[in-house]
Amino acid sequence: MDLRSVPASEVMHKEVISLSSSMNLEEVRDIFLTNNISGAPVVDEDGVLVGVVSQTDLIQVGLAGDFDDFDDNELLIGFSAWGVGGDSETIGDRLRGKFVAEVMGGNIFTAMPDDSASYLAGE
């Protein structure tokens, strides 16, 4: 298949879940888990794209600092168990205290529906 002849509109998601910069990261984690997604665009109140947040961003916030703060099971079970822990601060606690605006990336790759799939692939 020649990707130059396939329009982006044939491979892109048309219904996209977006986030606002004022959302806390615990809420974002729940959205990611509920919808089985690993990232989402951040839009302002006018719907203009201003950034992106990924599961990796949440992991970096959640694991910032000393790994000894977390129960081994919490780290091994992974992303879906965040917020579950013992007496120490949990990863969920760290997410609850941070907001999208603090972690969103601003280097955004955009494409139009009529761009080629090869453009999306960076060819």
Image (tube, rainbow, N blue to C red):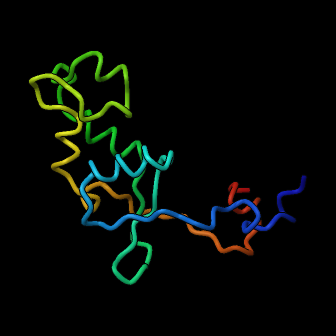
Report whether 97 appears left or right of 118: left
**Residue 76 to residue 115: above or below:** above
9 and 108: which is toward the camera? 9
Report whether 69 appears left or right of 3: left
- Count how many numbered circles sit on residues in the image: 0
Image point (73%, 66%), residue name? 8
User: Residue 69: horizontal and vertical position, in percent?
Assistant: 15, 23
Image point (33%, 30%), residue name? 81
Residue 94 in which image quadrant:
top left
108 and 93: which is toward the camera? 93
**Residue 50 to residue 82: above or below:** below
Q: Residue furthest right?
A: 1
Residue 42 in which image quadrant:
bottom left
**Residue 45 to residue 85: above or below:** below
Image point (18%, 32%), residue name? 90
User: Residue 122: horizontal and vertical position, in percent?
Assistant: 68, 56
Image quadrant occupied by the C terminus: bottom right
User: Residue 111: horizontal and vertical position, in percent?
Assistant: 63, 70
User: Residue 7: horizontal and vertical position, in percent?
Assistant: 78, 68
Q: Residue furthest left?
A: 87
62 and 13: which is toward the camera? 13
**Residue 5 to residue 80: above or below:** below
Q: Residue furthest front?
A: 34
Image point (30%, 17%), residue name? 73
Q: Residue furthest bottom?
A: 46
Residue 12 in which image quadrant:
bottom right
